[in-house]
Amino acid sequence: MRQQILRMHRRAAFTLVELLVVIGILIVLLSILLPVLAHVRKEGQRTACMANLRQLGQAYTSYLTGNDGRGIGYARHANGVWIQTFRSDYGNADRVRSCPSAPEISPDFGSAALSWTFDLDLPDLTLDRRVGGYGFNAWLCRWDATGRGGEQYSGGTPAQYFTTFPAESASVPVFGDCTWADAWPRETDPTPPNLIDGDRATQGTPPAENMMARFTISRHGRNINVVFLDGHGETVPLENLKQLKWHNGYVPAVWAPPLPAR
């Protein structure tokens, strides 16, 4: 009887070979599952980012409705960033100003993985309210005598600013993933040397800055999320950014040379 029990115990035990086989199977399963889980996580971040941008688009529409269709005056926009501008009309603006794919904060310009910090010293704009991951298409700023639409940064003319709701509103970006709070993209902006920091190192001085490069970041693969003037959102490939209607009279262009790999 005792020998029979011992034989049963020996049959129930794992051999070293069997244990190694089980460990190998687990390693294979993990190698398959981890990329899938990472992809699911990134898709979740992209979806949450798009939801943020759609809410910001609604806030902008609310602002237009409450101001007789006139865009944000640049002086007000610059002094409080668009977050502060929208706060009085859309209290949720603070919660949707940053992309989940860029949770860390830069002390100034952001990048594909970092939110920007707008360095303002205002009593009602605390540090956490100066941070964001999205940029406003500043060609939508109102051209007025005070701020002149940020003319010193855009290098543009009054005719390039949107003064009415254009027929091509579905092609006009309002907000998108960006390395700064705003930008005035131009079809003549050169191809950035990388897709990480939006050409921050070679920005130059206004109005010679490469404004299109601020949006040309690989935050969601080789794509960014954009909400348009008609309210819809899209995940836009970086190669297609120059095809959007960034300002009044904008002529669609292509990157020359093509965009870098990263």
Image (cartoon, rainbow, N blue to C red):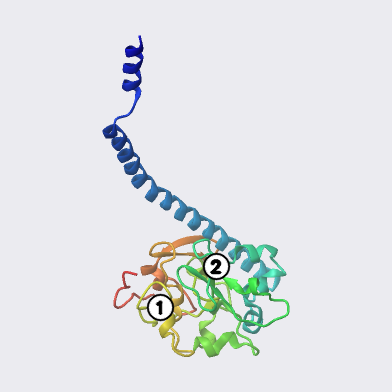
Q: Is residue 69 visible?
A: no
N-terminal of the pair, mark 2 or mark 1, is 2
> How far, Cα to Cα, is label 2 from label 1?
18 Å
Q: Is residue 146 visible?
A: yes
Quick one: SS at disc 1?
loop
Residue 229 location in percent, x, y? 54, 67
Residue 158 location in percent, x, y? 54, 87
Q: Nearer the viewer, residue 146 or 42?
A: 42
Q: Quadrant of residue 77?
A: bottom right
174 relative to 153, above or below: above
Q: Nearer the viewer, residue 16 or 177?
A: 16
Q: Quadrant of residue 161?
A: bottom right
Q: What amino acid is labelled 2 in the image?
A: Leu
Taking the image as shown, residue 163 lies to the left or right of residue 220, namely right
The label on residue 251 is 1
Q: Nearer the viewer, residue 23 or 74?
A: 23
The label on residue 229 is 2
Q: Residue at x 32, y 13 (%)?
A: 3
The outermost residue toward the front is 2
Q: What amino acid is labelled 1 in the image?
A: Val
The outermost residue toward the top is 1
Quick one: SS at disc 2?
loop
Marks 2 & 1, CB-CB < 8 Å contact: no
Quadrant where the C terminus is found in the figure = bottom left
Q: Nearer the viewer, residue 153 or 243?
A: 153
Q: Residue at x 53, y 79 (%)?
A: 108
Q: Quadrant of residue 33?
A: top left
Q: Residue at x 34, y 26 (%)?
A: 13
Residue 215 location in percent, x, y? 45, 73
Q: Residues within 10 Å of mark 2 (few under 14, many from 20)?
A: many
Quadrant where the N terminus is found in the figure = top left
Residue 111 location in percent, x, y? 46, 72
